[in-house]
Image (cartoon, helix red, strand yellow):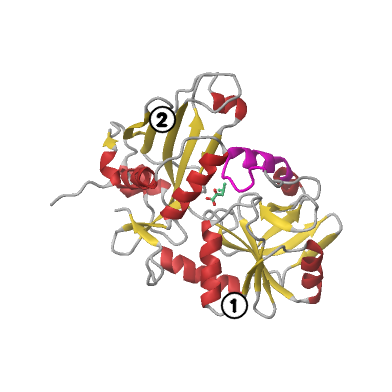
Amino acid sequence: MSTTTPADLFELHRTDHPVPDEERAKLLEHPRFGTVFTDHMARIGWTADGGWANRRVEPYAPLVLDPAAAVLHYGQEIFEGLKAYRHADGSIWSFRPQANAARFARSAHRLALPELSEDDFLGAITALVAADRDWVPSGEETSLYLRPFMYAAERFLGVRPANAVEFLTIASPVGPYFASGGVQPVSIWISTDFHRAGPGGTGAAKCGGNYAASLLPQQEAYAKGFDQVCFLDVAGETLEELGGMNVMVVHADGRVTTPAISGTILEGVTRSSILTLLAEAGHEVSEEPVRLDELTAGLASGEVAEVFACGTAAVMTPIGRLASDDFDLTVGDGGAGPVTVAIREQLTDIQTGRAADLHGWLYRLV
Ligand code: COI
């Protein structure tokens, strides 16, 4: 008996001009984050009258966009980030994509975009990875980054939710997010001039506007010689998140604290997975306000042992230095701490099939 899967609903239109094998092999050798894209993209259209229709995988190509398309004017757009990993037996798996599908639906709701079903989300990534399976790299610290996104395509300048929307998924073979590499510590500038989100805003939604707002402070952090920026709450008292990843603090007694989900930070899938692994490893984990004054005092006294960034792209990246207008502190000895290294290894071992998936987190794509 044959059963139809969500991926079967996507009609495959293969490109006549795939990247030649030799060129693709070269591109997969050292893929720099977000610079190389595969041969195809998955796509579904939506209209207020017709709903979701025309599911397809088609050649990767520039989009046709009307200059009056609402997304270009009012930023009605959301996206997701997840990865496909090649296992030793050649099979290809994704990590908790149902959680990304659920967050995508929450983001859509906040941006007044139509909700995409979990089936369509999973169908799109599965059909795309099946078509572009040769693009999934197999090297250490590599994967195929999947970027589902949805935008308001209607040609209309009035300010209201669009009646025509496009959903696409593109794929990009990637290595580590930070140029320094997977477990090399990064330096973080804590911004006191700018905030990423406020209560009732869009901080918990994965929408382009949040990232656009982070660019100027990020640019300022770069100009001061730092790798990333960290945002504080609107009162300037507690840590929120970095420009595209969550943050966690490991205390010398083994306790781990991380900013609580409060509507102003992204509900990271990697964040929640790490909290589970930490708790299972015997760490007391606490989602609570992380006060900047307590963090700096803890770093100075040695009560704070490790700080790390986490996210799909960043995985777990140790933070070796934290600074702002009135302090400049080294975290631990400035290197990658043992808790960060151990949990990172556990997480990536599960993702890449080197360790058993005891939580049912993996989802087979190919
Ligand atoms: C991710 O970790 O997937 C992100 O979306 C963060 C960044 C690359 C925008």
Q: Is residue 189 visible?
A: yes
Residue contact at pointers 1 and 2, CB within 8 angstroms: no
Horizontal relation, residue 342 to residue 226: left or right: left
Q: Nearer the viewer, residue 22 or 248?
A: 248
* Magenta stretch in the rendered image: 201-217
The secondary structure type at the circle numbered 1 is: loop
Image point 64% across, 52% down: which residue? 265
92 in relation to 17, above or below:
below
Viewer-closest of 201 and 245: 201
Label drawn at residue 46: 2
Percent position of residue 285, x then y = 61, 72
The answer to if 215 sits in the magenta stretch is: yes
For disc 1, the marked residue is 283
Q: Amino acid at mark 1?
A: His
**Of labels 1 and 2, the one closer to you:** 2
x and y, in percent, of residue 128 in the image: 34, 43
